[in-house]
Image (cartoon, grey):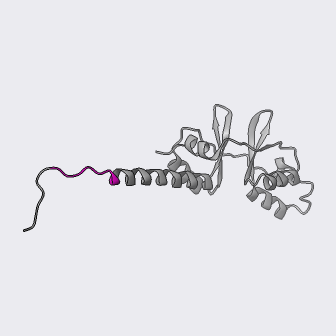
Amino acid sequence: MLHVHDVLALKGHVIYTISPDQSLKEAVHTLVVNDVGSLLVVENGHLIGLLTFREVLSAVDQHSSSETAIVRDCMVTDIYTVGPHDVVSHVAEELFRRKVRYVPVVERDMIHGVISFHDIQKAELEERHFENQLLKRYIRNWPEESGNSTQTA
């Protein structure tokens, strides 16, 4: 069974954060330069929001002056989080149900990272590939049948 910490181990634990008072333009720059789809919004060491391209596009659509918009005005504050020991299949179902692509991994106020649908799919593919290799190895080394064998005359 695949757990969130397995996905993080494959993905890595790099966390991109931004202050809620930084400009939306700075946030977009951070997203683009680091080729990521989400930023954790952190204030005084605490996770207070999540900013993804969805919120950025919505802000640009809604604000005629998106140049002056700040992260605090655009971020999601009702954040779904998971723990490192949560089962990935349950997390994927919840992401689908909530129609979100990114979920922060948090345990006792400690941020471990962020995983996405893409990260989950990649980890599940790796797990299937590994299981497939084990099965092939097992079949290749299948023990010979001993005892009477049927022979045709």
Residue 94 position, x and y percent, is 56, 51
Residue 96 position, x and y percent, is 57, 56
Residue 152 position, x and y percent, is 9, 67
Point 92% across, 54% down: residue:
68
Q: Nearer the viewer, residue 146 or 126?
A: 146
Residue 107 position, x and y percent, is 62, 34
Residue at the far top: name it: 108
Residue 132 painted magenta: no
Q: Main secondary structure of the magenta part?
A: loop
> Is 142 placed left or right of 20 in the picture?
left
Point 75% across, 57% down: residue:
53
Point 56% across, 55% down: residue:
121
Quarter location, residue 12 = top right
Quarter location, residue 104 = top right
Residue at the far left: name it: 153
The stretch in magenta equals: 139-146
Point 61% across, 43% down: residue:
8
Residue 145 painted magenta: yes
